[in-house]
Image (spheres, rainbow, N blue to C red):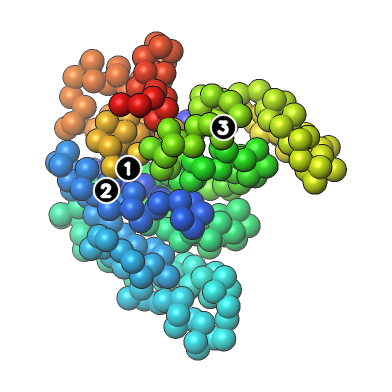
Amino acid sequence: MLQRVQPKVENPRYGQLIIGPPGSGKTTYCYEAYKFYRELGRQVGVVNLDPGNDNMAYEPVVNVMQLITVSDAMEHLRLGPNGALMHCAEYLEQHIDDWLLPALRKLSATHNYFLFDCPGQIELYTHHTAMARVFERLEMERYSLVTVNLIDSHYCSEPAKFIATLLMALNTMLRMSLPHVNVLSKADLLRKHESKLHFSVDFYTDVLDLKYLLEKLDDDPTMRKHRKLNEAICSMVEDYALVSFKLLDAFSTDSMLRLRNHIDKANGYVYKAGEEQTVNSLLACAVGAETEALRQQQDIEPYVKEQ
């Protein structure tokens, strides 16, 4: 796999771009991840880029709602919620050089790791360009970024929704053009709903042979009418072979540690001196360093077996 090589940067800065549909647990993850990374000793801060986020459990170091809010856009421009959110994203893009970047630069002495809590409207990442341009501008400022795409794990219980999730994840990965980690959030609830899954959990996390999922769609007369479309979508996802998922229980330290390893590889933090100082700890984060049995034990079983 070819990777973009960047020159060594003094005082490197890292970031997670937390995206995903409404209700997928983005703000909860940001709060729990903030506490988690603080305990690891990282100079971490949360940046709220969601102009409609009224229920933050964390205290953001930068808050886009000081620049513009969805409610203000709706009131003054007479827009609906979706149109107002898109306007806010465009407004943020227009003011990134005179508002967002200066605000982040003021934190350079105290913070070098940022969790960007992004809006939940999925069109902003699959069709619109404003957020992608904001992310691109951050990259130009030498932020080492990774997109963390949170998807509610209950979508695994419905084949049609899971296929739609795959298409959305693939579209987002291709449009963002950034290192990317797809996450099935609220994985602790899988144990409760395991009986509703048609296949084992690793079928969904590894996105295995999707023809079996198509067979389940045929059980629904409505979906059966669109079999050729569904076949084309599944074939495209398999041809790209890019989409897979990590499981996450944001309230579990072990789960957060496992996800941290994947994220640190994606944005290059694993190669930073500090936490990962030994060869063995670096190898522990390496792709393929674990046996399949160990991966199953640590990544799958905690979410489907009674503790």
Quick one: SS at disc 3? loop
Quadrant showing the C terminus: top left
Which residue is drawn at the image coordinates 24% and 35% (left, top)?
253
User: Which numbered marker is on residue 32?
Assistant: 2
**For residue 290, side relative to residue 162 (left or right):** left
Which of the 4 image quadrants contains residue 129?
bottom right
x%, y% of residue 66? Answer: 32, 76
Mark 3 nearby-residue class (10 Å; few <14, some 14–19, many ≥20):
some
**Dot placed on the residue nearer the N-terminal end, 3 or 1:** 3
Q: Is residue 182 visible?
A: no
User: Which numbered marker is on residue 197?
Assistant: 3
For the residues marked 3 and 2, what is the alpha-carbon distance in whole angstroms?
28 Å
Which of the 4 image quadrants contains residue 10?
top left
Which residue is drawn at the image coordinates 32% and 30% (left, top)?
258
Mark 2 nearby-residue class (10 Å; few <14, some 14–19, many ≥20):
some
Residue placed most toward the observer, 123 or 202: 202
Q: Which residue is mark 1?
A: 250
Which residue is drawn at the image coordinates 19% and 19% (left, top)?
278
Quick one: SS at disc 2? helix
Please, what is the three-letter code of the amino acid marked with disc 2? Answer: Glu
For the residues marked 2 and 1, what is the alpha-carbon distance in whole angstroms?
6 Å
Contact flag, marks 2 and 1 (Cβ < 8 Å): yes
Q: Residue furthest bottom?
A: 76
Quick one: SS at disc 1? loop
